[in-house]
Amino acid sequence: MVLSYTANHNELKQKSATLLRDYEQGRSQTIRNQLVTLNLGLVRKEAHYWSNQCTESYEDLLQVGCIGLIRAVERFELSKGHAFSSFAVPYIRGEIQHYLRDKGVMVRIPRRWLALQQQAVGVARELRQKYNRQPSDTEIAEALNISIEEWQEVKLAWANRAPLSLDMPVQESDEGTTCLGEIVPDSDYRSFQLAQEDRLRLQQSLYQLEKRTHEILKFVFLYDLTQKEVAEHLGISVVTVSRRVKKGLDSLKQLMVGAED
């Protein structure tokens, strides 16, 4: 069994290397798609891991991870001597994490509470059939063997697991429909504007950095890789990564201060 796995793994590596060499020479979309299909297992592994850490579906994460795999194929250079799998995983993981950050407005519920909520559906059904009425919170909590306080917290978290849309209609009159966004005061609007301006200045400043420093900062702060992982990924020392991070942050501060003047 082990020998069979090793043989298949080596065959995959050899086939990938051949296709990567062909892709470097011709940049064929057909070859790129073959590489993505051949290495889809890397995406499946990451998608499976992250689907257990969030509320997003496995299928959505798989699609997002494939974007990262495509980018890895397009940026891989055989001459640097890296294994393609080691090179591709940070791109796949980074793409998924970036996607999850963008979806970060969703409220994450602890896995224990999710399990309790799922159990509560069946428990409530059984209690309704037993008593011919809607069960109380106390009865459900007892059936789940948890305190009434924890059950109420589970219910509250489940009810507020998704944000309300500001476009949601809340009032109708002869003059038309009033949306939630029209009646909620936005005392933080100015703060939001400033945050957006800071983000724009940061993006502009990042692109003024030397290419390698920009790349290292992106892997450390955007993709959440450790400095050791970045060093292995780029084929440089951890000391070099550390120095580049410090130098890059200092340069960013100067650039952003200059952009405010």
Image: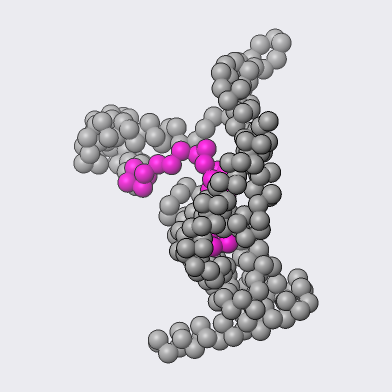
**Start-end of magenta stretch:** 90-114
The picture quadrant where one finds residue 150 is top left
Pick the quarter of the image with the N terminus: bottom left
Pick the quarter of the image with the C terminus: top right
Is residue 88 visible in the rendered image? The answer is yes
Q: Is residue 162 above or below residue 23?
A: above
Residue 3 shown in magenta: no
Give the side of residue 180 with respect to residue 207, left or right. Answer: left
* Residue pictured at 43% horizontal, 32% vertical: 159
* Residue pictured at 61% horizontal, 41% vertical: 254
The picture quadrant where one finds residue 203 is top right
Residue 190 place in picture, x, y as percent: 61, 22
Which of these two is toward me, 126 or 26? 26
Is residue 222 visible in the rendered image? The answer is no
Residue 218 place in picture, x, y as percent: 58, 54
Q: Is residue 32 above or below residue 174?
A: below
What secondary structure predominates along the stretch shown in magenta?
A: helix
Give the side of residue 239 with respect to residue 68, left or right. Answer: left
Residue 26 place in picture, x, y as percent: 78, 77
Q: Is residue 189 above or below residue 15?
A: above
Which of these two is toward me, 157 or 144? 157
The picture quadrant where one finds residue 90 is bottom right
Residue 107 shown in magenta: yes
